């Protein structure tokens, strides 16, 4: 079983819609969760971190964490073409090991 | 500009060559990392350095040899690589090794092994 799993997509949404990206993890004791955005040919860029159950909002981005179900999601409201990128979920496990998912490719259609 | 600079951006080498990848961070961070990113695979953590000391080596083959001469510079020395080593090699840094510290990535070196 993979430590972190994401649907590779591609996920396509129209401009202005809500994009929903999901991630599940296997280590139930994990405490720290991160979302990175990676444009094609560029490095991953941290956009959100979440440590507690519930929602965390930052501008158009909302991270949601449900430790009981072992999933973390990222919602992007009012999606823009500039949001088109690969979104990587990363989890810090109980052994202080940092694992990334394979990423979900998002395309926002103008 | 992420504050983490990697050179070269692209590298093509034969299996018998020896080359080095360089990473420099201008953020005053104490921890530095090497990752490998292959197509359709998750980012794989290769090495971790904290205050110039290697603290983690994730079962990486000996044909990859890291070096951290100071907290701002990190090298990855390559020799007798295999075709499956072709990938994007990313360097990252964080303030410290405290687990919640966000990592800042460089733009990577695209490595192709002939």
Image (spheres, rainbow, N blue to C red):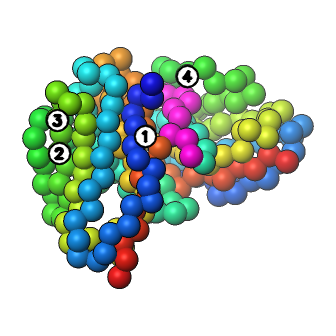
* Letter of the chain that mark 2 sits on in the rendering: A
- Reading the image, the residue beneath label 1 is A101
Q: Residue at x 25, y 20 (%)?
A: A29
What separation in Å lies between label 2 and label 4 (alpha carbons)?
30 Å
| Along the viewing direction, whichever of A52 and B67 lies nearer the viewer | A52
Mark drawn on residue A64:
2
In magenta, the rendered stretch is B40-51
Q: Are marks 3 and 2 in contact (CB under 8 Å)?
A: yes
Q: Are marks 2 and 4 in contact (CB under 8 Å)?
A: no
What separation in Å lies between label 1 and label 3 (alpha carbons)?
17 Å
- Reading the image, the residue beneath label 3 is A66
Residue farthest to the left? Answer: A54
Are dots 1 and 2 on a single chain?
Answer: yes
Residue B41 covered by magenta stretch: yes
Mark drawn on residue B58:
4
Q: Secondary structure at mark 3?
A: strand
- Lateral position of residue A60 relative to residue A85, left or right: left
Q: Does A5 sit above or below residue B3?
A: above
């Amino acid at each position: 079983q993979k430590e972190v799993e994401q649907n590779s997509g591609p996920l396509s949404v129209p401009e202005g819609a809500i994009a929903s990206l999901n991630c599940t993890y296997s280590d139930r004791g994990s405490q720290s969760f991160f979302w990175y955005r990676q444009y094609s040919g560029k490095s991953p860029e941290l956009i959100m971190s979440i440590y507690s159950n519930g929602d965390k909002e930052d501008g158009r981005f909302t991270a949601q964490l449900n430790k009981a179900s072992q999933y973390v999601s990222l919602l992007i409201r009012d999606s823009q073409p500039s949001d088109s990128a690969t979104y990587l979920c990363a989890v810090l496990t109980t052994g202080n090991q940092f694992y990334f998912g394979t990423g979900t490719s998002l395309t926002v259609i103008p | 500009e992420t504050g983490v600079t990697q050179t070269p951006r692209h590298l093509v080498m034969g299996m018998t060559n020896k080359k080095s990848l360089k990473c420099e961070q201008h953020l005053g961070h104490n921890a530095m990392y090497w990752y490998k990113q292959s197509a359709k695979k998750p980012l794989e953590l290769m090495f971790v350095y904290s205050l110039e000391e290697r603290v983690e080596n994730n079962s990486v083959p000996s044909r990859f040899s890291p070096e951290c001469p100071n907290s701002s510079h990190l090298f990855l020395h390559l020799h007798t690589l295999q075709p499956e080593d072709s990938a994007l090699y990313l360097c990252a840094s964080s303030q410290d090794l405290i687990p919640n510290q966000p990592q800042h990535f460089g733009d990577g070196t695209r490595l192709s092994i002939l």
